[in-house]
Amino acid sequence: MRTLLTTILALAVLGLIAVALTGLVPARKTPVQQRVAGDFTSAGGQGEYVVRVADCAACHTAKGGKPFAGGHAIPSPFGTIWSTNITPDPETGIGSYTLDDFRAALYDGLRKDGTCLYPAMPYENYRKMSEDDVRALYQHFMNEVEPVSNQVKETRLTFPFNQRWAIRAWNWVALDDAGFKPRYNDLVRDRGAYIVEALGHCGACHSPRNLFSAQDGTDATAQAFLTGGEIDGWPAPSLRGPASAVTNWSAEELKAFLASGRNSHSGVTGEMAVVVQDSMQFLTSKDLDAVVAYLRGISGAAEQLPARNDDKAKQTIALLNAADPSMDLGPRLYLDNCNGCHFTNGKGAKGVFPELDGNSIVVARQGGGLIDVILNGARMPSTESNPMRLAMPGFRDRLSDKEVADLATFLRQSWSNNAGPIDETAVVARRQKLAAH
Amino acid sequence: MSTKVLTTTRRAFLKKTAASAAVSALPAWTHEPAPVPLEQYQSQFFTADEWAFILAATARLIPSEGDGPGAIEARVPVFIDLQLAGDFGKGTKWYLQGPHDPNAPPQLGYQSPLPPAEAYRAGIANINDWCRSNHGRPFVELSPKEQNDVLTGLDNNQIVLTSTLGVNFFDLLLQNTKEGYFADPMYGGNCKMSAWVHIGFPGARASFREWVGVNKPYPLGPVTIAGERA
């Protein structure tokens, strides 16, 4: 709540500046950042590949809707944002956009008419896109995507967030320079950086937000970049530092997770399951290697995997193995409900049952992901290399709110895990959210 | 006719429970209310006379005397009543048209035009008639020994029921009684998991592989499908 109030206050101040700005300066479209031959045409398939990596469909294709025809609801703290139709339909889509108009949408969050898009469109990241890819994308949308006449719902946020002109001021504060600057003198890691920082817009979820709700850094030179964010009460785990999966998994395991949605440690769940299914699994092996090399580089991952706190883990295993009827409710619920698949060592089974020891969803600061998975279960995506949609059942009918809280707290503090407890009220809130959906 | 055909397959059971889990998505978890005492139970299928028969007959098949709970303590009659009131009783998913061959092998399926609920109704009336003509009283008014003799006679085919049209009433009743005794409490029987506790079955807990090879009984009591602990 406090963050929201400060955000509102900050926006109000920015608003005043913006009034002055919008009066005096017309919206400026960022020009071409790289020289490209005038008759540039993209290599066959390049546009489609960029669409996959940038995951345009994630927002612009509604569930059950035609590809890229918009109308997908994006929940934001300020209200629902409806994604736009980006098919080449001239009336309701982007058919009348020139290349410069198109680039301005990607780089500056500007529509053809000069009004601002909401930053749910990750132009903070897309503005680093290479001119090659911008053109490949443009040519793909104009020539290869089916035009669909679909007038999408108008986004109506509450005041003051419905004042689109104020986004001009936000842009002024939030946006870094356009264009991508390689900085590693290493083709592989620079390619990885480009995919993660620009096309893949990983920071949109995995970076924390600053006072202005902007991404706290948009490249690895920023301390906070990719150190974890939050979506709808779920953690978007940190991808850097000693506790991150990037540091604790081998390069092969990280690659397998992105390509297939599972590895010997875990199975992807939540929003990331959709990212793997619709985007990451389509990356070439070379690009995945680049992403992995870049992430491991910025995370400080070593060849030798770090050791776990084995003594603490052994205590949990001994407690569970004893199956003493006088044990606390948390471990008892684990044995009654979870042990069949995740086992007393909390390690699950490779590629099938996720590890709970060291699991980023389990130990996240935000308990929403863990509570939701206990209540509703989870399902892995179907990927080409691993099509089986393995699922965990939900326990919402089997466990009371207090039982879910006690079980979640046990999971967060067992084996080598060391995270804070989950309160019963948090479970009540997630259940109500589920009922409201 | 063997009652083997009445046993649902594991696959069909799993399919059914998956489907019911999907439609029973409750918004909030609720405690199971304490069941009403058996004397106050309002039967869904049985008439008062039939209900009295089922209480008496199941109490002879799994008596309350001796080790562990009897059919009455485990509320087996409730299980049978609910089953007969539902799809099982109506034979909803069975082929009930002819021809009906009482000597057909079990693979050929159920061999009676009467769905189980109607077979129960006809069978109970038939047994009470037999008891009245041979003892002058209905089954429930016989002594436990006389009741045992009647049931034994049915089991040995010394007493033959003509009204059940090919259904072996005794086999059906015995099978349903065992099922009510050991099925998950969500189906009305096995009250408070008493039958599971009695035999040391650990319930719906999926696995306890860390105890494989440990030469001691598993210490924790059972859990139900609904997550209750005993």
Image (cartoon, coloured by chain):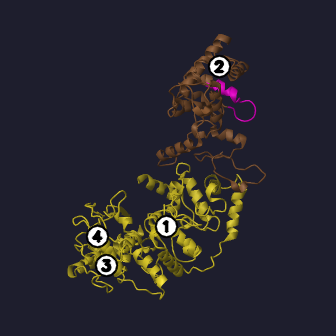
- Does residue B60 show up magenta in the picture? yes
Q: Same chain for marks 3 and 2?
A: no
Q: Is residue A405 rendered to the left or right of residue A313?
A: left
- Does residue A62 show up magenta in the picture? no
Residue that mark 3 sits on: A41
Instruction: Name the residue type under label 2.
Output: Val
Q: Is residue A97 rendered to the left or right of residue B81?
A: left
Chain letter of the residue beneath label 3 in the structure image: A
Give coordinates of residue B166: x percent, y percent.
59, 23
Q: Foreground: A101 or A323?
A: A101
Is label 2 in a helix, a strand or a loop?
helix
Whether residue A76 appears in this view of the structure is no
Label 1 to label 4: alpha-carbon separation:
38 Å
Instruction: Name the residue type under label 1.
Output: Pro
- Mark 1 Cα within 10 Å, few/some/many (few <14, many 20+)? many
Residue that mark 4 sits on: A143
Is B183 situated above or below A88?
A: above
- Mark 4 Cα within 10 Å, few/some/many (few <14, many 20+)? few
Do the residues bearing badges 4 and 3 touch, measured as CB atoms within 8 Å?
no
Residue that mark 2 sits on: B140
Q: Residue A94, located in which quarter of the rendered image?
A: bottom left
Instruction: Name the residue type under label 3.
Output: Thr
Label 1 to label 2: alpha-carbon separation:
65 Å
Q: Foreground: B114 or A74?
A: B114
Q: Which of the image's four quarters has the N terminus of chain A?
A: bottom left
Give coordinates of residue B89: x percent, y percent.
54, 30
Which chain appears brown? B
Is label 3 in a helix, a strand or a loop?
loop
Give the magenta range: B54-70
